[in-house]
């Protein structure tokens, strides 16, 4: 019996605390929960945007810069070292520094040029020297044969690789292909004088995307266009996700 008043008091205190938090949230200034952010720039002007301007706690202090060139065209640019924003277009979403691999004729990582020989289903084939490489978003094959696991690969990675080799393509687990390093193994294609992870091919939403690492020290080109370029036009962009 003695515990009943104490329990009731505790429930009342918790309810009051919840009500106060709800009231604080409802009275929070619009700057913390903006429904829209309007930017007005004259041609030639630019505006850095970051955590404070976007009310985005996951963004850095200066995450992107929006600018207009002399002709009035809008661009978004990002400084070195930030997580690239995701641009939404009518054709889908892609992260700055990435491009759909299907339709490319070639891509280049550092001094190495890789020429696409065909696109098949959800995969592609490309040539590097005398070797043919096939990648379907799950398994990299050299001349038709999957590579052995990389030294030190985790057990989960080994199990996933074995699963992908055994099941039909529709049941495979998406596993990225990385470029760089000195060793061909697993889903890694080693390239001389290129740091491991400089570029990556990965499956997303049923398509393969080529991307450059934000800190790539060498050029990553897709049909001659450098994926490390820090600025892109906003003409057909419908949404911009920061920190996603």
Image (cartoon, rainbow, N blue to C red):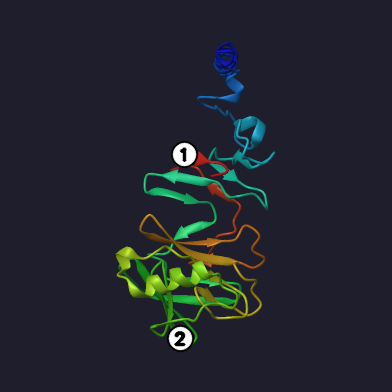
Residue 45 seen: no
Quick one: 70 or 7, which is closer to the camera?
A: 7
Label 1 sits on a secondary structure element that is: strand
Q: Earlier in the sequence, mark 2 or mark 1?
A: 2
Binning the other alpha carbons within 10 Å of mark 1 as few (below 14), some (14 to 19) or many (20 upward) gives few
Q: Residue farthest to the bottom?
A: 130
| Quarter placement of the N terminus | top right
Residue drawn at point x = 36 percent, y = 69 percent: 123
Is residue 207 left or right of 44 when viewed as pictured?
left
Label 2 sits on a secondary structure element that is: strand
Is residue 209 left or right of 197 when viewed as pictured?
left
Q: Residue farthest to the front?
A: 1
Marks 2 and 1, Cα distance to the nearest angstrom? 40 Å
Q: Is residue 69 above or below residue 149?
A: above
- Indicate the position of residue 214 as horizontal and vertical percent values: 62, 57
Label annotation for residue 131:
2
Residue drawn at point x = 38 percent, y = 83 percent: 144
Quick one: 157 or 94, which is closer to the camera?
A: 157
Q: Give the labeled residue for mark 1.
A: 239
Confirm or deny contact between disc 2 and disc 1 (CB under 8 A). no
- Indicate the position of residue 115 as horizontal and vertical percent values: 45, 76
- Indicate the position of residue 111 as horizontal and vertical percent values: 60, 76
Label annotation for residue 189:
none
Q: Quadrant of residue 170?
A: bottom left
Residue 156 seen: yes
Q: Quadrant of residue 70?
A: top right
Residue drawn at point x = 36 percent, y = 66 percent: 172
Q: Is residue 198 above or below residue 235?
A: below
State the count of labels. Answer: 2
- Indicate the position of residue 145 as horizontal and vertical percent values: 41, 84
């Amino acid at each position: 019996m003695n515990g009943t008043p104490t329990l009731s008091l505790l429930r009342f205190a918790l309810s009051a605390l919840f009500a106060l938090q709800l009231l604080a949230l409802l009275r929070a200034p619009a700057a913390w929960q903006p429904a829209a952010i309007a930017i007005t720039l004259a041609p030639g002007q630019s505006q850095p945007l970051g955590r404070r301007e976007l009310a985005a706690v996951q963004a850095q202090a200066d995450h992107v810069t929006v600018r207009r060139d002399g002709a009035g065209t809008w661009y978004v640019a990002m400084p070195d070292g930030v997580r690239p924003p995701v641009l939404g277009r009518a054709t889908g979403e892609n992260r700055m520094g990435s491009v759909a691999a299907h339709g490319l004729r070639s891509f280049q990582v550092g001094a190495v040029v890789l020429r696409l020989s065909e696109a098949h289903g959800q995969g592609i084939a490309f040539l590097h020297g005398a070797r043919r490489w096939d990648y379907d978003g799950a398994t990299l094959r050299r001349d038709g044969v999957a590579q052995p696991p990389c030294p030190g690969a985790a057990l989960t990675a080994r199990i996933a690789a074995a699963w992908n080799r055994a099941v039909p393509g529709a049941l495979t687990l998406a596993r990225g292909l990385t470029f760089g390093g000195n060793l061909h193994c697993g889903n890694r294609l080693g390239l001389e004088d290129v740091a491991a992870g400089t570029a990556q091919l990965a499956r997303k939403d049923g398509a393969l995307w080529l991307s450059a690492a934000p800190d790539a020290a060498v050029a990553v080109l897709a049909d001659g266009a450098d994926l490390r370029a820090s600025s892109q036009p906003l003409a057909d962009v419908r949404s911009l996700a920061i920190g996603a």
